[in-house]
Image (cartoon, rainbow, N blue to C red):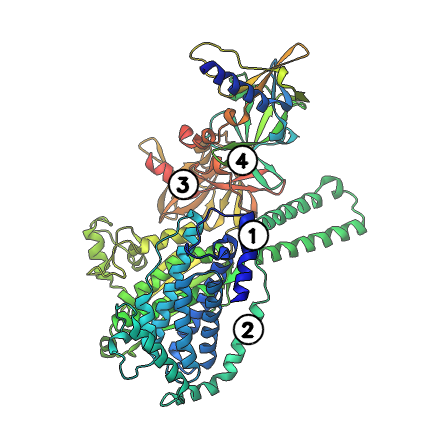
Amino acid sequence: METMAATSAASQKVDHRAGKYLTFQLGNEEFAVQVLRVREIMGIQEITAVPQTPGYVKGVINLRGKVIPVVDLRLKFGLPEIAYTQRTCIIVAQIENRGTKLLIGIIVDCVSEVLTLQTTDIEDTPDFGSGVETPYLLGMAKIKGKVKILLDIDMVLTAQEVMSLGPIGA
Amino acid sequence: MARKTEQKTVAAEEAAAAQEPVAPPAAASANPLAGDPELLNDFILESKEHLTSIELQLLTLDQDPGNAEAIHAIFRGFHTIKGMAGFLDLDAVREVSHEVETILDLARNGALGITGAVIDRILESKDYLTRCLTDLETMLQTGQAPPARDNAALIEAIRGLGGPAPGTSLGSLLGPVTPPGPVTMGLMELAREVAATPPEPDVEMAGVACPEAPEAVKATETKAGAARSIKVDTAKLDYLVDMVGEMVIAQSLVKHDPDLATGLKPRLARNLSQLARITDDVQRTAMSMRMIPVGQLFQRTGRLVRDLSRKYGKQVELDLEGEETELDRNIVEELADPLMHMVRNAIDHGIEMPEERVRAGKSPTARVLLKAGHQAGHIVIQVSDDGRGLDKERILRKAREKNLIPPGAGLTETEIFNLIFQPGFSTAEKVTDVSGRGVGMDVVRKHVQKLRGRVDASSVRGQGTSFLMKLPLTLAIIDGLVVGVGQQRYIVPIFAVREMLKPAEDAISTVQGTNEMAMVRGALVPIIRLHERFNVKARFEKPWESLLIVSESGGRQFCLMVDELIGKQEVVIKSLGETMQNIAGVAGGAILGDGRVGLILDLEGLFGASHRE
């Protein structure tokens, strides 16, 4: 009984995950986010630093009159910081958390392409053993022999996490 | 009757198509229109407008009981509300407005004199209707119908006004709580009869109205002028203002483009300056759309003055000046509470009883003045009374009792008066239900400071007290100094800046090796290094190489140390978003002339944070 419920839940989840993805590079890895969440992609521009925020929050930028926060995904994922280049991009994505929607800029090494992923391309996140929590991974996709990591952008940058930044730096 | 049935069937189909989960106010009713949230919303909005104008007209009528135009206007207001309420099955509202309408009809025909009691009852009805509307709003939001408000006593009281004919007890005039019985129905008949009979002693009332006619006509004309407007969602308006701000920046970016700077052809130069002019105009118009006259706010105090002066038996006259002064809508809304509080204070504490005033050689009727005007890019609102004034000795005594000032401190007059803005300060000897709970002027000051304004008190013993509020024209734009610290640029709101200086080396002293102080005009002022607080790299490490901005926060001065002053700019304030709302020392962001974001400093937060450490 339990297994049946699990299977049906899994199949439902797979259905939910299939669709178009924007893939980008971070270090040696390829990541992907749902294209529906992406508002626009822009080249790196000058970022205004905001005090009392964790290191991965690079600051704020002007998106046509709207001030939006920008995070460096490398730093967020604990990868070493590198200098920004011509290929460095800011992906402006909409994240949602408990009903609040907000735009956020995500700095990545470079943007690759838009892929359509079928249910069969997607596999569940492997179990990394106890103590390794991967709530922000939707799953893995195998395309042309390469593995792409599907990110749940809402979980990577929960609004709440960014909201609770204040006290950390203070 | 047939029409109503038809309406019901049509509406029933509609209801079947889209049935809202919201329970209609009159649940028993079969009229599905009654539950339509959109209709109800329209009703609430429109009725509120009517009620506001009703109250205004009532206050006019109170001053001038013969004003026929005012009676008509009030009648029309209640009539409209009654009509709409009937359509929406809001029985409680309909009944009350109907009764008021009946009374007003009597007054209109001269069969009933407008007395204080009549106005009181109508004001009560207005309050009742306002409460009903609030209930409706709550219901729309929560989906739960609040308990119906009992209107029996009110209706009884209103009916009592109609005919103090034989059989009517005087009690009903004074607001009894007896439920309406068959007797009251009889009374209604009586009232109608009275209405039908030729007017008796009150004829002169109607006659008085004639000389007032030209004024009344003028009033309707201005009203017609004001009605030529449309309602726009404030969110859309805000967006427009935002976008116009962007346009101004984009325009200035084009204008200052280095490619254009060299060899600008006359035609291009002409067109560019034309664009600049138009952008400027558009910006000004967009800004002005948010502005509303402050008079609307002032008029709201009229009711308060009337109620309070009656309650205390004081004679108070309200004078309004500069009502046409325009202010940002958000400011007007935020200002309502502090203004009410100050007027309340003036009447409760400031103004003496008539006998006392006569003894002091003043007119028994006191004056409360509300005055608005422009002053150097700010709006100044003055609330003053000609009452007994502030008692310096008592303020000092109280402040010492509450340990608000160190013993033996010598304070100037202004400093003493400003003590009343301290939290927990109240000089009222006894706590009345109107004021004197010690949550008074400090709340007023907090409100005003939130609006980036300031409030000061001045007073002359025996002659009155005056409060002066200085506010920015709009909340959307701020006048700021752009300062640089290392690679970063920040905006310091100009209203908080006292002066800027490059100190001499010997003007800097260090207290206990850590706290730096600068000698500014003979006073030691603490220095806050902005780069340390924000953890950025500054170009200068020594205070005498940098620029010190002397600012004031919470009545205390401090110096903000920055590298350089870049310029002065009007900026549109943007929120940094929910994610970065509570960063100490940062009030928001603004797009600078080159399209980059600059952080607007919150000096209070900066100083407060350093204070706690």
Q: Do marks 1 and 2 share a subunit? A: yes
Q: Which residue is mark 2?
A: B222
* Residue drawn at the location 28% of the way across and 67% of the way down: B179
B485 up-or-down from B135: above or below: above
B266 up-or-down from B227: above or below: above
Q: Position of residue B237 (x, y in %)?
A: 58, 52
Around disc 4, counting alpha carbons within 10 Å, would you say few (fewer than 14), some (14 to 19), or many (20 or more)?
A: some
Three-letter code for the amino acid on which mark 3 is drawn? Gly
Q: CA distance from mark 3 to mark 4?
A: 25 Å
Q: Tell me the mark number nearer the camera, choosing from 1 and 3.
A: 1
User: Can you see residue A28?
Assistant: yes
Q: CA distance from mark 4 to mark 1?
A: 37 Å
Q: Which residue is mark 4?
A: A102
Three-letter code for the amino acid on which mark 1 is drawn? Glu
Q: Which residue is mark 3?
A: B605
Three-letter code for the amino acid on which mark 2 is drawn? Thr
A124 up-or-down from B449: above or below: above
Residue B298 is drawn in which quadrant?
bottom left
CB contact under 8 Å: marks 4 and 1: no
Residue B528 is drawn in which quadrant?
top left
**Which chain is disc 2 placed on?**
B
Q: CA distance from mark 3 to mark 2?
A: 46 Å
Q: Residue A89: which numbered mark, if any?
A: none
